[in-house]
Structure formats: structure tokens, C-alpha cells
Image: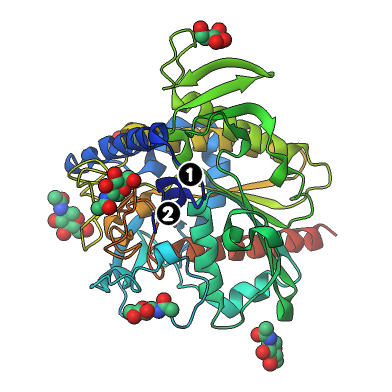
Amino acid sequence: MKLHATELLFGKNQALGNTAKIVILIILTLIVLTLISLHYPLLGYPSVLVKNSSQSSSDTADQDLVRARAGKKCDIYSGEWVPNSNAPYYTNTTCWAIHDHQNCMKYGRPDTEFMKWRWKPDDCELPIFNPAHFLELVRGKSMAFVGDSVGRNQIQSLICLLSRVEYPVHVSYRPQEKSKHWQYTNYWKYTNYSFTIASFWTAYLVKAKEADPNGLFNIYLDEFDKDWTNQIEEFDYVIISGGHWFYQPSMFYENGQLVGCYFCKKKNITDLTMYYGYRKAFRTALRAIHSLERYKGITFLRTFSPGHFETGIWNQGGNCVRRRPFTSNETHLEKEELELYMIQVEEFRAAERKGRERGLKFRLLDITQAMLLRPDGHPSRFGHWPQENVTLYNDCVHWCLPGPIDTWNDFLLQMLKMEADGRLHTSDRKMKIK
Ligand SMILES: *[C@@H]1O[C@H](CO)[C@@H](O)[C@H](O)[C@H]1NC(C)=O
Ligand SMILES: *[C@@H]1O[C@H](CO)[C@@H](O)[C@H](O)[C@H]1NC(C)=O
Ligand SMILES: *[C@@H]1O[C@H](CO)[C@@H](O)[C@H](O)[C@H]1NC(C)=O
Ligand SMILES: *[C@@H]1O[C@H](CO)[C@@H](O)[C@H](O)[C@H]1NC(C)=O
Ligand SMILES: *[C@@H]1O[C@H](CO)[C@@H](O)[C@H](O)[C@H]1NC(C)=O
Ligand SMILES: *[C@@H]1O[C@H](CO)[C@@H](O)[C@H](O)[C@H]1NC(C)=O
């Protein structure tokens, strides 16, 4: 069986021509270029950069902080990975939700150390995921995940973490697409908690169409992707994410007109950067959320998840063979990935300010720094059988399950707890005023 790179990377089943392969080569080259930076450690947490770059963020940044025991505020997103001999909390035999390409133990990954770390924020503790607590907090509620296969990777982690308490019932998928049902709209229900999870698959967050069979995409940067924007209005939580698809050559449309392209190599079309498309796509996705009149949910933007190809590009021996996390002084975010991260944060802050006018909450699920430190957590060559002729042989983009991506759900639960505490404080205040 031959697996195609886009399928591996993004969970999409499509025949790829040579152009598409070149395209993916370019994508991965860029990823690799950004990772060369791993060898040049410098200072700087992304959160530090964000704070420096945004003058008016002191009130908003508070949303991402928890009170540590001492009463000090704590940024749960800056810290280090520390050993945790109790992990993992599920295996590929206790959880059926692990996507095949991330079932690293099935494909013979020899080491298990990568599962045995937990995230330790500098100034407080991040509790390990407690499935019963999570389900109590979301009882009667609904949560939508909007994004690509890296987003799907998080949902599968969440289902596995929750499986110690309950498995969901798979409520719907389009039956004719059963074999690739993870790619489309899915609903799962936790019957004992009336909790619904839905996933909406979108590569670019905005309307996009394949322009030719070789994988060049037309991206309509100011148009909603109605496959998800029409469906999220009643949700209590919406988690949006995106990133890796924007490395692909693409044609950008605004007001229905071609305004330029990224790396399409057509002489009469204006060259634009991937950042141009990426910023506008996030802006439009967040505008779509603002445009939903009945929407009262909390929107989480899950930040860019770094890849870790080293010592070569993706199809020329590039791989991720490290077996330990970095410490925060060994690497730092820079170049393309830093730019993509900063764009997300800037667009998020603008949407958050706008949301405050009508009481809509926006929160950052700021996983970038933590995941930058986990070159050891990817499938690498253990996402398929050794003899399989796959285009993307070493996957250094997705995350093994169980693995470091489970921590995204530790963060998510912590954020939900903070919301619950916030509600308590708000009602306390109201009672005092009365
Ligand atoms: C952020 O600002 C602080 C104080 O103004 C400074 O010490 C620090 O070097 C800055 N960090 C970056 C990454 O610019
Ligand atoms: C789970 O992993 C083991 C190796 O640890 C492997 O032998 C087995 O086939 C895997 N099972 C499933 C259902 O993926
Ligand atoms: C719901 O709770 C009941 C009683 O505790 C239990 O027997 C049942 O297995 C639970 N349902 C699911 C889907 O876990
Ligand atoms: C660019 O040139 C090609 C071939 O000459 C033509 O088909 C296409 O319409 C042109 N595109 C634009 C935007 O002018
Ligand atoms: C990096 O930090 C670790 C502790 O987190 C420390 O042991 C190590 O010496 C530091 N390395 C450098 C190069 O500063
Ligand atoms: C793998 O597939 C590619 C493209 O289809 C082909 O050129 C190559 O010969 C195949 N390699 C093996 C070992 O089958």
C-alpha cells in the first residue's frame, strides 16, 4: 500500500501528482530550515516576546495566568518538561481512538521514555489530566474542534484520556465516507455527561479549493469555510487551530479576485508570502466567529505546533531521532515558526479585544513553547510499517499517542478550571453588590 504525504501529514486521501510531491518537498524544506535554528540557542520564551510586542496586553495576558500557591501569578505556558514515571495514562490496547499513523508502539517504536514526562510551569504546577473532573466541568456542554490533522491528533488524545471514565458514542459521520471519516464532520456523545465533542475538518480555516489535481490550492482569504462556520453557533467551546497547510504553494483570492500567490511560480501573478495568507485566514476565521449572533461560547486558539526535522529535509534523511526533550535554554522559536506564532497571537489579541465589546471570550491555548521542546515526541518512522513505500517516511509533524500532545489537554482542563473559578468570582462580586 502506498500512503501519500498529504494523507500522512493532514489526513486527506488524495492522489498526488509530481507537482504535489514537489510542493510537499518545499513545505518540508521550509520546516527543516526553521529547525536548523535548533542549533543556535538564544534566549526568549514566546510568551516573553508576546508580552514585549503588545503594549495593551496586560489585562488580556491575565487570562492565561493562574494564581500559584504563593499568590503570585503563574504563566502555565512557560516551563520545563520533568520526568513523570506514572505516565502514560492509556495505551493502544486500552484506547481505540489512536489514529494509525500516530500509533507508534504498533509500528515498533522501541523506546517509551517519550511518554514519561510532564510539563512543569516555572512558577506553579500543571495538574495531570483528571478525566472525571474534566467531564464534570463540561457536563451538558459541547466542544468543537476546528482544524487539520494536528487538531485531530488532540481530539484523539482527549478521547483516550477520557476513556478511563467513559467512551463516547460516535453519533454521526457521512456514511459513504466511513473509511476516512476522521476528515469530515464528526460528533461524539458522552451519554452519562450529555457532553458532545465535534470535529470540523478544515485545512485553511477559510474557503479553499484544490486548483488543479496536482495539489495547488485556491484560498479565498476573506470567505468563510461554511463547513464549520455554519455549524458552531450553538457550541459552548470552540477550539480552532491551523498552520502546516500554509507552507504549500497557493493562490490567494480576495473579493473573488486573484490578488497573488505564494510560490506558484507564475510570472504574471504577484508574489505574496505565506504569512500574508496565514494572517488573513486567521483574521477571517475569527471574524466568522464574531459574526455568529447567537454564539456565546468560549473560543480557544491553539497556537502553532512546531515540527522537528533535523539533519536533512523530509525526503532526504531528515528525521527526528532525539530521545529526550530539550530544556528551555537549549532551543528557541525563530524564523518561520516564530513569525507564524506571532501572527496568530496578534490576530488573536485583536479578536479578543473585539469580543470583549459583546462579552465573547477568547483564550489562547499557547502550546508552542512546550511543544518546541519535544523533538522526541513525533512518530518519525514509526507511523507505518518499515516496508511501506510512503512519501513522508519520517513524520516529525504529528505526535505519538500516548505522548506529549496529551499535555494539550492538561492545558485545556486547566483553562476550563480557570473559567469555572472566574464564574464563581464574578457571581461573588454580584452578590456583594446586591
Ligand atoms: C522583553 O522586555 C524585557 C524588559 O523590557 C527585556 O528585558 C527582555 O529582554 C525583552 N525580551 C525580548 C525577547 O525582547
Ligand atoms: C499496541 O502496541 C503493541 C506494541 O506495544 C503492538 O504489538 C500492538 O499491535 C498494538 N496494538 C494495537 C491495537 O495497535
Ligand atoms: C454510564 O454510567 C453507568 C453507571 O455508572 C455505567 O454502567 C455505564 O457504563 C456508563 N456509560 C458509559 C457509556 O460509560
Ligand atoms: C497569466 O498568464 C496566463 C498565461 O499567459 C493566463 O492564462 C492567465 O490568465 C494570466 N493570469 C493573470 C492573473 O493575468
Ligand atoms: C540549561 O538549564 C538546565 C536546567 O534547566 C541547566 O542544568 C543547564 O546547565 C543549562 N544549560 C545552559 C547551557 O545554560
Ligand atoms: C516508491 O514509490 C515511488 C513513487 O511511486 C517509486 O518511484 C519508488 O520506486 C518506490 N520505491 C520502492 C522501494 O518501491
- Which of 320 and 115 lies nearest the eye of the viewer? 320
Q: Which residue is mark 1?
A: 15
> In the drawing, what numbered circle is on residue 433?
none
Q: Which residue is mark 2?
A: 77
Left/right placement of residue 39 relative to residue 242 reads: left
Q: Is residue 322 visible?
A: yes
- Quadrant housing residue 122: bottom left
Q: Amino acid at mark 1?
A: Ala
Secondary element at image label 1: loop
Q: Residue at x 32, y 75 (%)?
A: 84
Image quarter (top left, top right, bottom left or bottom right) of the C terminus: bottom right
Q: Quadrant of residue 218?
A: top right
| Relative side of 315 to 224, left or right | left
Q: Decide: few, some or many residues near mark 1? Use Cα within 10 Å; few <14, some 14-19, many ≥20.
A: some
Q: Residue at x 48, y 34 (%)?
A: 215
- Quadrant position of the N terminus in the picture: bottom left
Amino acid type, mark 2: Tyr
Mark before the other along the chain sequence, 2 or 1 = 1
Give whichever of 402, 141 is nearer the camera: 402
Rendered location of residue 203, percent (x, y) = 55, 42
Residue 299 vs residue 198, the one in the foreground: 198
Q: Is residue 91 visible?
A: no
**Nearest to viewer (mark 2 / mark 1):** 1
Query: Which residue appears at 23% of the width and 38% of the height?
Result: 37
What colour scheme was applied to this rendering of the protein?
rainbow
Image coords of residue 30 (percent x, y): 32, 34
Between residues 350 and 158, which one lies in front from this camera angle?
Answer: 158
Classify residue 426 by image quadrant: bottom right
Q: How many marks?
A: 2
Secondary structure state at the residue bearing disc 2 = loop
